[in-house]
Image: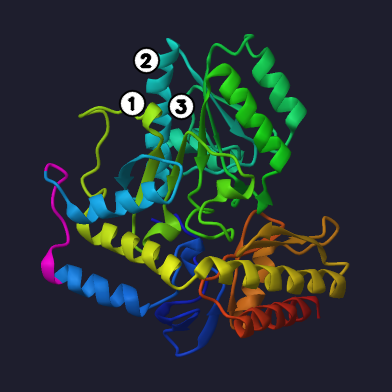
Amino acid sequence: MGTYTRLPLQIVRGKGCWVWDSEGRCFLDAVAGIASCTLGHSDKALRRTLTRQLKNIQHVSNLYQISEQEQLAHWLAENSCADKVFFCNSGAEANEAAIKLARKYAHKVKGIERPKILVANKSFHGRTLATVSATGQFQYQRDFEPLVDGFHFFPYNDIDYFSNLVNNLESPAPNIAAVLIEPLQGEGGVIPGDKSFFNRIKELCIKHKILLIFDEVQTGMGRTGTLWGYEQFPVEPDAFTLAKGLGGGHPIGALLVKNEFNLFEAGDHASTFGGNPFACKAGLTVSQEIKNRKILNNVIERGKELQEGLDYLVKKFPNTLEATRGVGLIQGLVLSKDSNLTAQDITLSAINSKLLVVPAGKKVVRMVPPLIINKNEISKIINRLSLAIKQIKS
């Protein structure tokens, strides 16, 4: 239906951090399905376990017990601050579930008739009507009014503004049900959360009994160098959402909550395909491989090398590039405000240099390669990105 402006590239095969197009050209993939292909392309462990799973069963209804779902839920609970899991199919669906949970919390626990959920400017929480209403970027909301009511926006990383908002919004904040926030804003320009800011949010949420929900769709499953983005602060949320990297390229999403906020009852929420055996086996395989291969250590080391390489490019092209920012293997290259170039310009030029990158807004080039990327491949990203910038400037 023309909902995507597709790049002039048809990818037909992949292996590790490399993909091939229909013309046989090979590209280094620093997009990874937009932070989804955690173990890279055509991973042996995923191929083996998913082939075996297809020989057993790929889907049954949630009317029945599903052992693969129970195993994945157990792993997630054992390795996070959460106790219970609801499975769905995407990040938007996971955030929809979180919004419903926040509203039930408001009605049942706080006795609020018309609750508000606080969300950040420049955030991105999905494309469904509720999640796009919670997204702090007007370009995603345009032409879809009237939006879902009940969201109030604040500047990301602004401690004073947030403190005043919570303390003064119909003081003492009786109508605020929840805060929904990303530990690092991905689509908003690869903006890491400030530790002091998130610690202040946690303090105020405890004080006013506000539900704290993290959107970990892009930061979860090791992307930042810790298993969960919240460990970077560290601040434990009351609930958080997952998708993208959880399935290693297979559709799965999840809402995780602590026991005391597990308010959903039978019939409150559901998903036909959510938590099906095939998707959960993919998620379980990714989870186990992250531990078995010590992938978090690789993310920390390769992330440092990537950031150092991008810093080098900023010095090399001072009139084009302004800064780098990010954590682990989610890194952004910020273009100068005075430059006429856009992130899309560099993305297109990078294709000619056999490198795949993705914009995060008009002025930030984002790199989210598979978490199994090696030192040599990081070096190739920098070299090919340098060539792409040089070509577009000449």
Label 3 sits on residue: 148
Question: Which mark's residue is nearer the viewer, 3 or 1?
Answer: 1
> Residues at badges 2 and 3 in contact (C-beta under 8 Å)?
no
Question: Which mark's residue is nearer the viewer, 2 or 3?
Answer: 2
Q: Which residues are magenta?
A: 55-63
Q: CA distance from mark 2 to mark 3?
A: 21 Å
User: In this picture, is 232 found above or below 366?
Assistant: above
Looking at the rendered image, the quarter that the C terminus falls into is: bottom right
**Residue in front for this viewpoint, 42 or 26:** 42
Label 1 sits on residue: 263
**Residue 204 lies in what quarter of the image?**
top right
Q: Residue at x 80, y 76 (%)?
A: 393
> Residues at badges 2 and 1 in contact (C-beta under 8 Å)?
yes
Q: Earlier in the sequence, mark 2 or mark 3?
A: 2
Label 3's element? loop
Q: Residue at x 13, y 63 (%)?
A: 57
- Magenta span: chief secondary structure: loop
Looking at the rendered image, the quarter that the N terminus falls into is: bottom left
Q: CA distance from mark 3 to mark 1?
A: 22 Å
Q: Residue at x 13, y 71 (%)?
A: 55
| Picture disc at residue 108 | 2
Label 2's element? helix
Q: Amino acid at mark 3?
A: Val
**Residue in front for this viewpoint, 133 or 163:** 163
Q: Earlier in the sequence, mark 2 or mark 1?
A: 2
Label 1's element? loop
Q: Amino acid at mark 2?
A: Lys
